[in-house]
Image: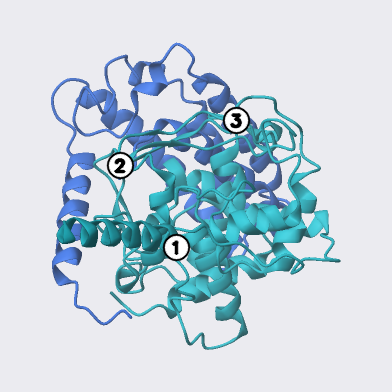
Amino acid sequence: MRLLRIGAILAVAGIAVFWLLTRPEQVAHGTLDGTTGDATRGALVFAAAGCASCHAAPGAEGEARLVLAGGEGFASPFGTFYAPNISPSPEHGIGGWSVLDLANAMLHGTSPEGQHYYPAFPYVSYANAELGDIADLHAYLITLPVSDTPSRAHDVGFPFNIRRGLGLWKQLNTGKGWVMTDPADAQVTRGRYLVEALGHCGECHTPRDALGGLQRDKWLTGGPIPGSKGRFPDLTPGTLKWSAEDIAYYLETGFTPDFDSAGGAMAEVIQNTAQLPPEDRAAIAAYLKALPAN
Amino acid sequence: MFSKARISVAAAALVAMTGVGFAASHAQGEFAREIKARQAQMTLYAFNLGILGAMAKGEAEYDAEAAALAANNLAAAKSIWMPTAWPAGSDNASVEGTRALPAIWAADSDIGAKSQAMGEAVAALQAAAGTDLEALRGAIGPVGASCGGCHKSFRAEE
């Protein structure tokens, strides 16, 4: 009888701890009071953060890339995730979102309803985004065309379909700050922001552990492409021997130093980086050159 | 943060890369001739783009005549009629030595439109390359974008 009681107490305590540990985090209310975004600057944040690459409808080209209807699938060892509609549709997209809602989504992976997002949405990286940039991005996103395509449910099996459990995953994998803690100068600092935060390069170019967490001690050293036999390349200077100019030119035109051209997902990325100011591409290159050789 | 030695990872990557390189340059079996021919056309693109790109990047001095010749070569290489080098079944799921994806031959494939887009970008570059460096720089970007347009959908990752 006594054992049973202890068992019951432990179970309740366990549930309470789980509930506490898995509680979705949010930006404090009032943090963004009086913040108004600038849509023109937001367009550059949009390009740097690569939003269209995942949230445009599959195969969308040109102007159609600005219709953020979602639907692109992302294979992973845990199931297939589908990018949701983030067009300004009040019903199917983010039409009703405040800047604070967008900040909670990007910085904490928490939805306006207080649920965890799956980390296929790269909030682990966006966590280092600046609030001003998020406000600008919000101002830009609400100017884009509305799509009334409903978001497709993720195809994820048990136990990964229990969203609350993502709170534990977040305990392990979020809130770690910058990987490069000592950027040498303003250019590398800007590059760090573009690579580690907005550009979320590490989400593909850094290998993941068994639970899908980024292996930060192997930062940008490449990794397997889920659902393919290919690999995301190692970007550290020991392997990537391109000059800073070569890297910047690649991000502008897609041309490698041999004048082969970027393909696959990276061709999608180049469509974004081509829109950035030249200083930003140079900053990304400077950051990559400043990484320790693998 | 980066302290661990990762020699084995690097070695594995090297082996993987070498393997891919070997496969790419040694197409064998069915469609080997076709694959070699279409890769040769791509090599011609890359060679002439390299001459233009070196000027655009500032690695080589701008030379209007050389730029115009390279752009003419690019346009000539683009004009070679090559559907015969792309027979159905010569995709990377069916044969070795190619990264061409089956999507090229799918019913809803827009490869024709993509090819046309490249033709237009190359024609614009041909018109601009011999004018001045700024014109060359402005026109080579869209050519790169057109290369990416095809490679994004139709070429497998290494």
Give the chain of mark 3: A
Q: Which chain is cyan?
A: A
**Mark-to-mark CA distance, 2 and 3:** 33 Å
Q: Which residue is mark 1?
A: A20
Q: Which residue is mark 3?
A: A60
Q: Residue at x 22, y 53 (%)?
A: B17
**Mark-to-mark CA distance, 1 and 2:** 19 Å
Q: Residue at x 44, y 73 (%)?
A: A176
Left or right: A169, with A198 as reference point: left
Q: Which mark is residue A159?
A: 2
* A53 relative to B13, above or below: above
In the figure, the shade used to draw chain B is blue
Q: Secondary structure at mark 2?
A: loop
Dot 1 or dot 2, earlier in sequence: 1
Answer yes or no: are tags 1 and 3 on the same subunit. Answer: yes
Which amino acid type is shown beneath numbered disc 2? Pro
Question: Toward which corner of the image does residue A187 lie, by quadrant?
Answer: bottom right
**Mark-to-mark CA distance, 1 and 3:** 42 Å
Pointers 1 and 2 in contact (CB under 8 A)?
no
Question: Toward which corner of the image does residue A146 lie, by quadrant?
Answer: top right
